[in-house]
Image (cartoon, helix red, strand yellow):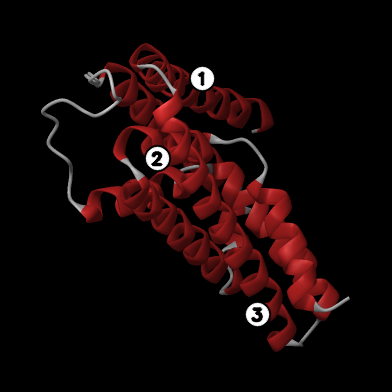
């Protein structure tokens, strides 16, 4: 099978997995609109790209150290908890037609950075890419072109499916009542907090 196709299959598999980045992506698309959802997806893509490059350059050795793994797991979990608390406490006021009331929209870079760090702070994403890099490198040996083609297929597939999620979520906005939109905001906040706590606990258990 061609490396590009193999990478696309992996990317699609990762794209349908539930995680904090996916919840935040859907929430942002519903509350902030299509454009800002795409910016968040762009930040997530840049984060995955950075992680793949770091793994390719040898970050496997860094993560493989027990002490570094413990520190990274705790910090990553706490970052997700903070994101969750801020999301839950943020007041969302909407009109009957689901438009935000007197809300100052952050600049484009805010959403890009949010997507980047939300994904980057998840140690499971690190472990996933490290594992894939080790496996793919072993499969293709010294064939760097095949390795790069594989990850190009993975990353582009993930980004494309994230954009699709943004488009679908933004279209669903018109069918959701204001109360439901506020509940979604709170639900995403709670999920992020729980996911962050889960990461910290699991890091300690695996240490």
Q: Is residue 71 left or right of residue 133?
A: left
| Marked residue nearer the N-terminal end (1 or 2) | 2
Q: Residues within 10 Å of mark 1 (few under 14, many from 20)?
A: some
Taking 145 as reference, is 200 above or below it? above
Q: Is residue 157 left or right of residue 104?
A: right
Residue beneath label 1, please? 194
Q: Residue at position x 68%, y 32% from top?
A: 206
Q: Residues within 10 Å of mark 3 (few under 14, many from 20)?
A: some
Q: Residue at position x 85%, y 74% from top?
A: 139
Residue beneath label 3, please? 148
Q: Nearer the viewer, residue 110 or 133?
A: 110
Residue beneath label 2, please? 29
Q: Residue 188 occupies which quadrant of the picture?
A: top left
Q: How many marks?
A: 3
Q: Residue at position x 54%, y 38% from top?
A: 70
Q: Secondary structure at mark 1?
A: helix
Q: Secondary structure at mark 3?
A: helix
Q: Residue 176 occupies which quadrant of the picture?
A: top left
Quarter of the image with the N terminus in it: bottom right
Taking 29 as reference, is 183 above or below it? above
């Amino acid at each position: 099978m061609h490396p590009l196709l193999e990478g696309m299959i992996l990317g699609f598999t990762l794209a349908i997995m539930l995680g904090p980045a996916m919840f935040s992506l859907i929430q942002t698309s519903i509350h902030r609109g299509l454009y800002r959802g795409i910016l968040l997806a762009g930040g997530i893509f840049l984060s995955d790209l950075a992680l793949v490059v770091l793994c390719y350059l040898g970050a496997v050795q860094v993560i493989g150290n027990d002490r570094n793994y413990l520190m990274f797991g705790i910090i990553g979990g706490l970052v997700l908890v903070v994101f969750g608390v801020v999301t839950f406490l943020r007041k969302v006021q909407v009109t009957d037609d689901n438009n935000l009331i007197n809300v100052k929209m952050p600049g484009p870079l805010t959403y890009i950075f949010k997507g980047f760090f939300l994904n980057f702070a998840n140690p499971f994403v690190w472990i996933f890419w490290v594992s894939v890099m080790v496996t793919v490198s072993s499969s293709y040996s010294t064939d760097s072109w095949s390795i790069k083609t594989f990850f190009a297929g993975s990353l582009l597939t993930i980004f494309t499916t994230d954009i699709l999620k943004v488009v679908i979520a933004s279209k669903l906005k018109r069918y959701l009542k204001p109360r439901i939109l506020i509940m979604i905001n709170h639900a995403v906040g709670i999920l992020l907090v729980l996911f962050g706590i889960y990461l910290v606990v699991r890091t300690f258990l695996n240490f």
